[in-house]
Amino acid sequence: MRKVDKLSVIGDEIVTRAQRSDLYAKVVDDRGNVVGKITRILGPVKSPYGVVKLRTKDALNIELFIRE
């Protein structure tokens, strides 16, 4: 699993560093519970960003990971 860097928070979404292959990847908490998924990849091809749609705003305050 790869840690999610929270670069920006917009409502119930987080913008984080991503890879193009991360589209629709599940985002989990430290216990492995799914709390959201990457719904969009945007930005420059060499350094894309992913938009994570969270299931709950409670996930904004905990450490998150991308399940690979």
Image: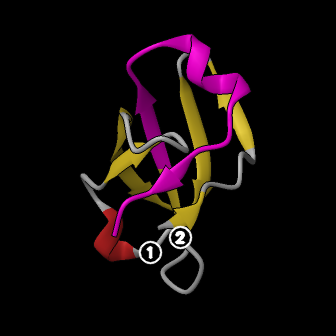
Tag 1 residue: 19
Decide: few, some or many residues near mark 2? Use Cα within 10 Å; few <14, some 14-19, many ≥20: some
Residue 43 in the image: x percent, y percent? 54, 64
Look at the image and say whether residue 53 sits in the magenta stretch.
yes
Q: Which mark is residue 45?
A: none
Q: Is residue 10 left or right of residue 26?
A: right
User: Mark 2 falls on what kind of element?
Assistant: loop
Residue 65 in the image: x percent, y percent? 52, 53
**Residue sitting at x 59%, y 13%:** 58
- Magenta highlight range: 51-68
Q: Are marks 1 and 2 in contact (CB under 8 Å)?
A: yes
Judged from this view, the residue extending furthest toward the front is 31
Tag 2 residue: 48
Rendered-image quadrant of the C terminus: bottom left
Q: Measured along the vertical axis of the image, is residue 63 above or below residue 19?
A: above
Residue 25 in the image: x percent, y percent? 29, 56
Task: Measure how far apart labels 1 and 2 are at the Cα level.
Answer: 6 Å
Q: Is residue 62 left or right of residue 54?
A: right
Look at the image and say whether residue 33 sits in the magenta stretch.
no
Q: Measured along the vertical axis of the image, is residue 57 above or below residue 16?
A: above
